[in-house]
Amino acid sequence: MLILLPPSEGKAASGSGDPLDLAGLSLPGLTPARERVLESLVALCSRTECSRTGCSRTDDERARGVLGLSPGQAGEVLRNARLREAAAAPAGEVYTGVLYDALDLASLSAAAYGLVERSVLVFSGLWGAVRVSDRIAPYRCSIGVKLPDLGPLGPYWRVAMAAALTDVAGDGLVVDLRSGAYAAMWTPRGETAGRTAVVRVVHERVVNGVVKRSVVSHFNKATKGRLVRDLATAGAEPGTPAELVTALRDLKYTVEEQEAGAARQFDVVVADL
């Protein structure tokens, strides 16, 4: 089973160990592509490229503009500039936010954490995709960024990840919990698509006596984190979309299949957070 997750926009304040080792990350076939993105991002944000008289506001403004940051987030530019020497930590500790709070890796048993470690890939505008145990430095670079010399990161990673992700998916189930922009980085094809379950979370509520459903970000992220946690805690490793549905229903989730495409699509329906 391979579970695909989005990253979080929020990151831990800093790592706690040795600097990043690109060659030590999972999916080593992505190393050259990661190196090019890292080089472009560091160059964009590096203050060492300023003149001897200092770094002007224009330099920071350009980097913030490319990265979609506000003036109050200038510290993110400096952090990106120091990525090569910054202390790294496991990706599961670096990513914060609603989904990762709900997943709560630190409180999992050793067996449950092991299942997450071997099953989950977190997609990233900077790293492509990493395991939760891969040591990375905190950064700011979403998939919507257009970096100098590389262009938009979405199309860039689609090319780089096509072969690598098909290989790592193997002949098992793929559970796709990514958000739209990160889902576009890799689309399962052929036989892999037939073994893929795309899972969406919808919030059901009654308004003036009428049942309404919508996709709400907070419900979506929290439920996906709990879903992965519950599967891991139960030791569930389904091998097909049908087995995934059975496992989730056994865990008391309400699951409905939607119109079938190349991949099977399912809604997990929640009423309360």
Image (cartoon, rainbow, N blue to C red):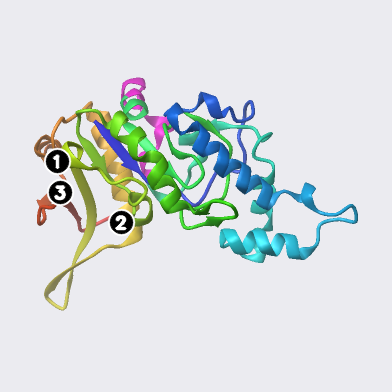
**Which residue is label 2 attached to?**
219
Q: Amino acid at mark 1?
A: Gly
Residue 191 sits in quarter: top left
Which is closer to the viewer, label 2 or label 3?
Answer: 3
Expressed as whole percent of the image width and height from the top left, the position of residue 117 reads 37, 27
Whether residue 7 is visible to the viewer of this picture, yes or no, is: no
**Which residue is label 3 attached to?**
262
Residue 247 sits in quarter: top left
Label 2 residue SS: helix
How many numbered discs, if any?
A: 3
Q: Nearer the viewer, residue 104 or 260?
A: 260
Give left or right: position of 254 versus 174: left
**Marks 1 and 3: in contact by CB < 8 Å?**
yes
Whether residue 17 is visible to the viewer of this picture, yes or no, is: yes
C-alpha span from label 2 to label 1: 27 Å
**Which residue is label 1 attached to?**
194
